[in-house]
Every structure is written in C-alpha cells, then in structure tokens.
Image (cartoon, helix red, strand yellow):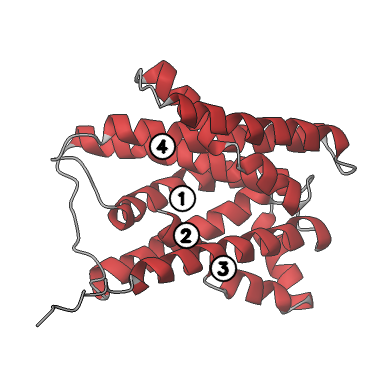
C-alpha cells in the first residue's frame, strides 16, 4: 500500500499578518495624506504622537491583557538605553515620513520608500561590514534608477518633501541595522511586539515636548476642528496606526 504524500498546512497566520500589513499600511498612508494635505491639518509631529500613544495602549492590551505573546522584561539599564536609542531613530523616521506626505503624492512617497533595502545594504556594509551577495546589490540598481527617473518626471515633485522622504527611508534602514547591532545577544533580544511595547512610550516622551514647542496650541486646534467635523474623530479613533506598527514589527 503506497503512502499518500502529506500536504503542508496553509500558513494562515503568516497570510493574515501580510494582509494586515498591506491593509493597515494603505489605510495609514491615505488617512495621513488626507489629514495633512486635503483636510489641511498641518501638524505631523502631533499626528505621530497620536499614533505612538495608540501603539502604547494597544500593545499593552495585546501583551499584558490578551497574552498574544509572552511579556519580556528589560533586564538592565544598558538594554533600556539601547531600546531608547532605537526608539529615537524610529520616531525620527516616522515624523519625517509624515512631514513628506504634506508635500508629495502617496504613490511617489511609496516609490521612494521602496529604496529602503538599498539604504539597509549600504548601512550594513559600512557599519557592520556585512556583505550581501552580488546578485542582491545588482537587483537594487533598477529600484534606485527607477526612483531617480520618477523624481525627474514627477509633476508634483517638491524638494523639501523629497528630502524628508529620503531621510525617513534612510532612518528606517538605519534603525534596522542599529537593531541588529544593539539587540544581537540572546539575553537582550526582544520579539517584535515587546520591542514596540517599550519603544512606543519612549517615542511619546520624545514627541510630547517637540509637539508643545514646535506646534503650539495644536491640542486646542484639534479639538476645535473635531467639533466642526466629526470625521476627524473617526480618523483618530480608527486603530489604523497601531495595527500597522504591530504588523510591521
């Protein structure tokens, strides 16, 4: 009697996370673009602060209350300092990305963001001397070339927005390399959700004074706008930001 070949189980969890990432990424980009450009809400730092506050709340609920993953504790001041450094870079990249959405179309913003692997490879080579296969470097050439061509022919090109988007992309790549350096040992390594749990509140503490200094009276303006248009509350109330960061991490 011949044995029937067993079929591999469908990885529904992985498929679900990929779908969640795509859906939340598109939702965050379009809603942020609507708020910062179409709606005229010109406060990208405060918008990022709202996202990070939501991430703090929902990651705590997911880990501490729902037990989605086991809670990992920070074991030393050195480890906390490393997480804080990562959080600052992460926070900077998100703010720059939100600023760029004020000036660039979403499609062009995402085209620039596609160069993240290029910056990651460059930082990995110069910082940790990590060499990729030549085929990897070769495949990055069309991506970078495409962005250069698109930049020259983009009718809505804005220099400051372009600089902010490139900065956000480079900072995102730098964070990935920095994360590999700082949290490389087994004793310090955190899973993605626990890392977000600790990084999000640190980002909030960085963004709060920056918001108060650089975007004066933003809370009062936001409340006034929300009273005039209830759609603004829905844009903030939807759990889009936290779903994106949880699925991305």
Q: Earlier in the sequence, mark 3 or mark 1?
A: 3
CA distance for labels 3 and 1: 25 Å
CA distance for labels 2 and 3: 21 Å
Residue 141 position within the rendered picture, expressed as x and y whole percent measured from the top left? 62, 29
Say which residue appears at 49% left-offset and 68% top-offset: 19
Residue 213 visible (yes or no): no
- Residue ID for mark 3: 23
Say which residue appears at 23% left-offset and 65% top-offset: 69
Say which residue appears at 50% left-offset and 62% top-offset: 21
Location of residue 119 with respect to 227 vertically, above or below: above
Q: Earlier in the sequence, mark 4 or mark 1?
A: 4
Where disc 4 sits, the SS reads: helix
State yes or no: discs 1 and 2 in contact (Cβ < 8 Å): yes
Please name which of the two marks, 3 or 1, marks the residue nearer to the observer.
Answer: 3
CA distance for labels 4 and 2: 22 Å
Q: Mark 4 Cα within 10 Å, few/some/many (few <14, many 20+)?
A: some
Name the one closer to the observer, 20 or 226.
20
- Residue ID for mark 1: 204
Q: Earlier in the sequence, mark 4 or mark 2?
A: 2
Q: Residue furthest bottom?
A: 1
CA distance for labels 1 and 2: 6 Å
Residue 223 position within the rendered picture, expressed as x and y whole percent measured from the top left? 68, 68
Per the rendering, the mark at residue 53 is 2
């Amino acid at each position: 009697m011949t044995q029937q070949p067993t079929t591999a189980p469908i990885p529904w969890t992985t498929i679900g996370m990929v779908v969640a990432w795509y859906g939340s990424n598109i939702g965050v980009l379009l809603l942020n673009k609507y708020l910062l450009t179409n709606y005229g809400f010109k406060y990208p730092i405060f918008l990022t602060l709202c996202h990070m506050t939501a991430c703090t709340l929902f990651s705590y609920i997911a880990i501490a209350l729902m037990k989605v993953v086991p809670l990992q504790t920070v074991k030393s001041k050195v480890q906390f300092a490393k997480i804080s450094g990562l959080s600052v870079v992460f926070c900077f990249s998100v703010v720059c990305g939100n600023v760029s959405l004020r000036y660039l179309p979403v499609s062009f913003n995402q085209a620039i963001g596609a160069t993240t692997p290029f910056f990651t490879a460059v930082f990995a080579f110069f910082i940790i001397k990590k060499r990729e296969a030549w085929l990897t470097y070769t495949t990055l050439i069309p991506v970078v070339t495409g962005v250069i061509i698109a930049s020259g022919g983009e009718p809505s090109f804005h220099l400051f927005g372009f600089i902010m988007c490139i900065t956000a992309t480079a900072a995102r790549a730098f964070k990935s390399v920095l994360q590999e350096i700082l949290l490389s040992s087994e004793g310090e390594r955190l899973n993605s959700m626990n890392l977000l749990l600790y990084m999000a509140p640190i980002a909030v503490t960085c963004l709060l004074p920056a918001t108060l200094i650089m975007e004066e009276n933003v809370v009062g303006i936001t409340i006034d706008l929300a009273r005039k248009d209830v759609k603004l509350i829905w844009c903030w109330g939807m759990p889009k930001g936290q779903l994106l960061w949880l699925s991305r991490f």
